[in-house]
Image (cartoon, rainbow, N blue to C red):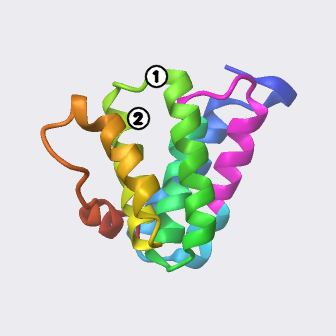
Amino acid sequence: MAGHNGTTTLEWSRAYHDGVRLADCGDIVRAAPALLRAVHLAERMGKPDERLACSLYALGRLHRVNGRFAEAERLLRRAMFVETRALGSAHPYTRQIARAYALLLRRMGHDREAARIERAIAPVTSGPAHSDDAADRHAA
């Protein structure tokens, strides 16, 4: 299925999965550009949807595990916004992104903003936001 500018779901899928695979193998140098390509392809596909959100999330996690917190914060904030609009605030994927974003904010010393996000997702989770270090290992 082609989006605007002839971008196809297949092109996006290849870029996204290549980026995730490279990150899983520890090839950060090649993973980041592949995931950035996935972001750009998803942006060209029309209305922002879960493809854009998951691309932003994967790239944001990659930057976070590599200590690029400011860039990770921008990407995760945008991923949370897009995913909320695409799937709703109660969707498990939206909550996963929100937990990762809150964790990053805490690591950056933005406890008040992290607490606000944690409160917003608390009614649909079984406890406070938790670390997604396992996901970080998966993205590294």
- Residue 4 covered by magenta stretch: no
In primary-sequence order, the first of circles 2 and 1 is 1
Q: Quadrant of the N terminus?
A: top right
Mark number, residue 70: none
Q: Residue at x 43, y 77 (%)?
A: 26
- Residue 38 covered by magenta stretch: yes
Question: Which kind of residue does numbered mark 1 sit on?
Answer: Leu
Q: Main secondary structure of the magenta part?
A: helix
The picture places residue 55, in percent across and down from the top left corner, at 56, 47
Q: Residue at x 53, y 76 (%)?
A: 28
Q: Tag count in the figure?
A: 2
Q: Is residue 49 visible?
A: yes
Mark 1, secondary structure of its residue: helix
Above or below, 46 against 54 in this view is above
Q: Quadrant of the C terminus?
A: bottom left
Please tell me how crowded label 1 is: few (under 14), some (14-19), or many (20+) other residues with Cα within 10 Å.
Answer: some
Mark 2, secondary structure of its residue: helix
Q: Marks 1 and 2: in contact by CB < 8 Å?
A: yes
Residue denoted by label 1: 87
Q: Quick one: which residue is furthest to the front in this view?
A: 112
Residue denoted by label 2: 94
Question: Which kind of residue does numbered mark 2 sit on?
Answer: Thr
First to last magenta residue range: 34-50
Above or below, 63 against 11 in this view is below
In depth, the one of 11 and 95 nearer the eye is 95
Q: Cα distance, mark 2 to mark 1?
A: 7 Å
Please tell me how crowded label 2 is: few (under 14), some (14-19), or many (20+) other residues with Cα within 10 Å.
Answer: many
Q: Residue at x 24, y 63 (%)?
A: 134
Q: Residue at x 57, y 76 (%)?
A: 68
